[in-house]
Amino acid sequence: MSKYQSTTGAIGFISGTEKDALSLKNGMVQNILSGDGLAREDAVLTNERLYYCIKSGVLDVHYQEDIIDLEDITACKITDLKPYGLLVGAVLLMLASYFWSNSSLNENPGQGIFLAGLVLGVCMIAGFFILKKSFLEIQYAGGRIRFSVKKYKMKDVREFQRRIYLNKDRLEDQLH
C-alpha cells in the first residue's frame, strides 16, 4: 500500500496495485497568492484512478475528496487566461500621461497628470497579475473538478493531462 495521504487526511490508495504516477499540489499560500482563496488542494494520478482533495476556509472549513476511476474521465481541459489588454492599456496610459504633462497644450504643466497616469498604470499592471489564471478541468461521468495550476509550468500541466490519457489507454488495453 502506498504512503499517500490526501489534504483531507485520507491515507492510502484504494487498491494495492495502484502506483503513484504524478501529483499536482497547491498549498494555502499558493492559492492565496493566485487569488483562489484559503484552500489547500492536491490531485494525484495513479495508474487506475485520479484522487482530488481540497480543504478550504478557516472558520467554515470545507473538505471535498473525489476519487475518479480513469475510465470515467470524459475530458481534460487546460484554460490559460492572460489579460494582456491590461498591460497594453497601462503602457499607453503612462505614455499618454507623460506626453500630456509635458505638452504645451496643457495650461498647468506639472507632475500631477503624469503621477496620476503612473499610479493608474501600475494598478493596471497589478490587475494583470491578479487576473492571470490557469486551470486544469477534469470532466467525468457525474461531475467535474477544476483547480488552479497557475504556479505550474504549462509543460508540467500538459504532462499531467497526457498521463491521464496514457493511463486510460493502458487500462483499456488490459480490459481487451
Image (cartoon, grey):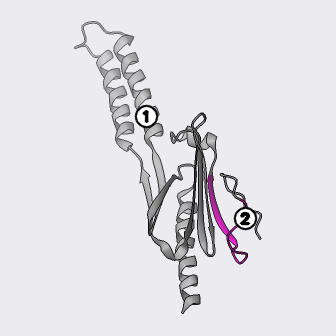
Structural crowding at the residue carrying mark 2, measured as other residues with C-alpha within 10 Å and reported as few (<14), some (14–19) or many (≥20): some
Q: Name the residue carrying label 1.
A: 127
Q: Is residue 102 visible?
A: no
Nearer the observer: mark 1 or 2; the answer is: 2
What residue sits right under mark 2 in the picture? 12
Instruction: Tell me what residue is drawn at x 44 percent, y 66 percent.
Output: 142
Does the magenta-highlighted stretch encompass residue 52?
no
- Residue 108, percent from left and from top: 28, 6
Under mark 2, the amino acid is Gly
- Which residues make up the magenta segment? 11-25
Residue 73's place in the image compared with 127, above or below, is below
Q: Residue furthest left?
A: 105
- Mark 1, secondary structure of its residue: helix
SS type, badge 2: loop
- Residue 15, position as x, y percentages in the image: 69, 74
On the rendered structure, is 23 left or right of 141? right
Q: Nearer the viewer, residue 161 or 114?
A: 161
Q: Amino acid at mark 1?
A: Gly
In the displayed structure, does residue 77 sit left or right of residue 95?
right
Q: Is residue 168 left or right of residue 110?
A: right
The reply, left or right, for residue 5 in relation to residue 38 is: right
Dot 1: few (<14), some (14–19), or many (≥20) neighbours within 10 Å?
some
Q: Which mark is residue 30?
A: none
* Quarter of image, res 90: top left
Q: Quadrant of the N terminus?
A: bottom right
Q: Which residue shows up at 49% across the image and 73% down it?
A: 72
The foreground one among 109 and 112 is: 112
* Residue closest to the eye, 170 or 12: 12
Task: Determine the CA span between mark 1 and mark 2.
Answer: 41 Å
